[in-house]
Amino acid sequence: MGVGTTLARRAVFLAAALVIAVFLTGVILGASGYIDKVLNAIVLEEVRAYRQGLSKLYNLTAAERDRLVAEYEKTLRDYYQLDKPWIYRLVPTVLSTLTLDLGYVQSGGVAEVAGYQLPVRVSTVVLTCLPRTIFMITVAEAITIVIALLVAPFIVYRIGSLIDRVVVAYAAVMNAFPLWWIALVMLFTLGYRWGIAPTRLRAVTASINALFSGNLLALGEVFYYAWLPILTIVVVSLGPWIYSVRAMLIRVVKEDYVTAAVARGLPEKYVLRRYIMRPAASPIVTNVILGLAGTIGGYIITESVFDWPGMGTLYYSAIVNADAPTILALTYIFTLVYVVARFILEVLYIVLDPRVRL
Amino acid sequence: MSFIARVYAGLSWLRREVLSQFSGKVAIALLVAIVAVSIYAAATMPSNYNVIWNYPLYWEANPKNSPPEWSTYFGTTCLTNQVYDLRTATPRISVDEEGRVRLTYNMTYTLDVKSYPRALILIVDSMTIPANVRNVRVLNTIVKPDGKQIQVFDDLVDFTKNVTAGSFKFTQTFRPELDKIYNSLLLNYINYNIDPNDVGVNYLSYIFGEITQPDPKSTARTTYLTGRYVISLTLDFRVEGVAQELLLRSIKNAARFEYVVVGTCYGLMGTDYQGRDLAMGLLYGFPIALLIGLGTALMSTGLGLLAGMVSGYYGGFIDEFIQRFIDVLGSIPLLPILILVAAAAQTAFGADPNKPVLMLLTILGVLVLFGWGGLAIVVRSMTLSIKSELYVEAAKSIGASNFRILIKHILPQLVPYIAASLVYSTPNAILTEAGLSVLGIYHGLPTWGGILAEARTQGRVEYWWWIFPPGLLIAITSLTFVLLGLALEKVVEPRLRR
């Protein structure tokens, strides 16, 4: 099989995964009755509030009031399309999502996460939340990766030394702690107890908006809110990251040709660059790209702990409010980013590793 | 060698390899400890533990949101929760000519720190009241160290309505009555200007404090009064021809008959917002966590093993199908789908009495469904290479069945990979369950994650005894498996050895 055929095959399967993920989400939402239950509850609550509001108007007769309430309820049920079976509601939404027509946000709660009021397009909400996640989680992941790529080659020559043992122990411990728990503890100690860090991180919205309207000084404010989450993520994910890069490098270091190169007296840096990093490049690049792609979806639980109004919080809010267009759109975007990253990797393998081209 | 012997030999080799490393030794020590605690907890767990945990009345007499008792060594002013179990106490008995049986319990309470108790409660649970007991007057007074006597409550409970047909179970909680307290304060402190509203809010400081009034025009104030308090509880039964022994026996056999001076600290691990004993929740969390972790790991490993062996051994269309299936599964973002499924399950099982278990099973089911792909790929490539070995060819040529070859020749060689997969995926389920709980998709079972989740929903980040222990236990359990995995990794991937 030629390179082109292989890539085309991959593309087809990745596209299939994308379609399946969005359809699966739609089926879970509909078949479990989740959407119907939550929406019915929302309609019930809004109708109750409306009736209460009407009852304050004394010039209405009971019959008129009932008619108005019934009309209002019908408007709401039409708006949410509750009288159609879920399959007629969700399949069109799924299909339009797949053609990148993401539609409108249904719930006010979801729009609020991004700082909007209804009606607002899903794409607008997503484009508002995405930079917030990038400023916090992607930046943290990038910092982690840079540190890991600097530290791991340093210790790979010193396997078994004290510093290596410390790094492995640190990696093991940090692998065991859930990120969101460390986040809780950091917020508790640095935020509430010592008062060093801000505790109401949702306020970052204003700073990011200011930044995007051209006020570059707001970057400092963004950092003021973001440093605690970034520190937390770096502290927790650095250990496992160094460990995995170390493991990839060790596999290469153990090869005979590396031993031979060192024995020939080649400088350590040269051996590292040419003999170790080059063959280890493709697994490392895989990890880097998939790691960065994974941050786009936000860390749902960690964002929720910090109350950071990013993609993860948006997704969770969409689930709580049973906002089908937003849920489907986000699932689509999360999967799309991953699938595209995988495809880029397929191409990169061919570039990085000549053997694949054969 | 029989199949079992070969697997056993493989496992004992694995054990030796693991134990030869430092991380392996630590991991095994931790694992033994965790399993021992789990077995102890599972053996002592009351069968209705889940019900008890979610039953607020059971925890009524405990202080709420209280730090553990040992926090007193770190500077917290700690008033121990004092429980008087009156079933075992001997009352003073007096019987008058009208047939009333009067039982008086005297308890001494020493207040030795500058603090006020949080509450006073008398709990009577399932006390069998014999027929012909008309009523009981329950009277509680406290004599302060300075000799002043405060009446706490005085209740008359009428049994005549209930005791029409034989005996019945008497269950009631008695609490301080503000009017009684205020009246006895007026009697005892005649020239004081006592503010009834303040008594209503801070009545405990009037019972357990010194009342001063420096200026005749101002209102009375309270300060801490340490010393010996005598709490006297009188049960005055109006009976018709019932022997007092019968009454005493039914008191002895009650489920609970306690007088509690609620403190500000509780037990080994403190309490949560409902006064639940966190030590209990944490202890019984051990077997639940292990069950969640190991159960999910076993299922996903089994599935991965089966799929990998079938895929590698039979090849062809079925291989292609399984591999593409794994591809697709691997491209679907797990956590968003999991959160969605769990939220849907929470609503779908809303009315079901088994909702907690069903929800947990759904969550674990999704984890299993998405968790087997990695092992299947490894097992497939191992199977492919073993399949072409000469001894497999030989076995085939003498007519060994496929099943026999899979079980006898291929499976035993996969043991280290199976063990590694088990070890890697065990903490995963525990962490995910806890994470979902913390997010707010809480199944209601008292797991460590559940305890953490409630700490968060109550918005009480400052309650360290409520946040730290469950998180640390999750981390230690998970660390055990991470260390075990670290040791196994060198077995599975010999290139990692020094």
Image (spheres, helix red, strand yellow):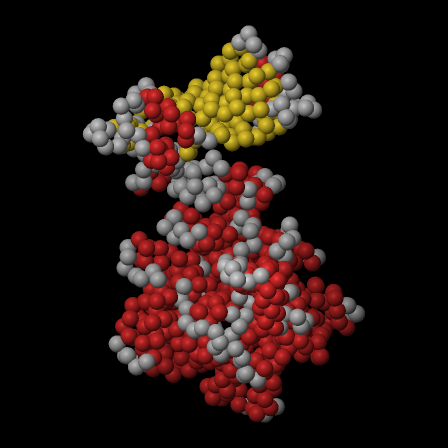
Assign the C terminus of chain A to one quadrant of the image. bottom right
**Figure check: B368 above or below B231:** below
Q: Residue furthest front?
A: A59
The image quadrant that residue A166 belongs to is: bottom left
State the residue in front, A240 or B169: B169
Query: Residue B224: image x %, image y %?
Result: 29, 31
Which residue lies at the image location 32% right of the left edge and 55% below the top edge?
Answer: A192
- Can residue A337 be spotted in the picture? yes
Residue most extreme to the top: B97
Q: Where in the figure is residue A268, as x and y percent of width and height?
A: 32, 78
Q: Is residue A288 above or below residue B135?
A: below
What residue sits 52% from the left and 18% below the top? Answer: B236
> Which residue lies at the image location 50% right of the left edge and 53% below the top edge?
B449
Residue B245 in picture, x, y percent from top left: 59, 14
| Image-quadrant location for residue B150 | top left
Dividing the picture into quadrants, the one containing residue B218 is: top left
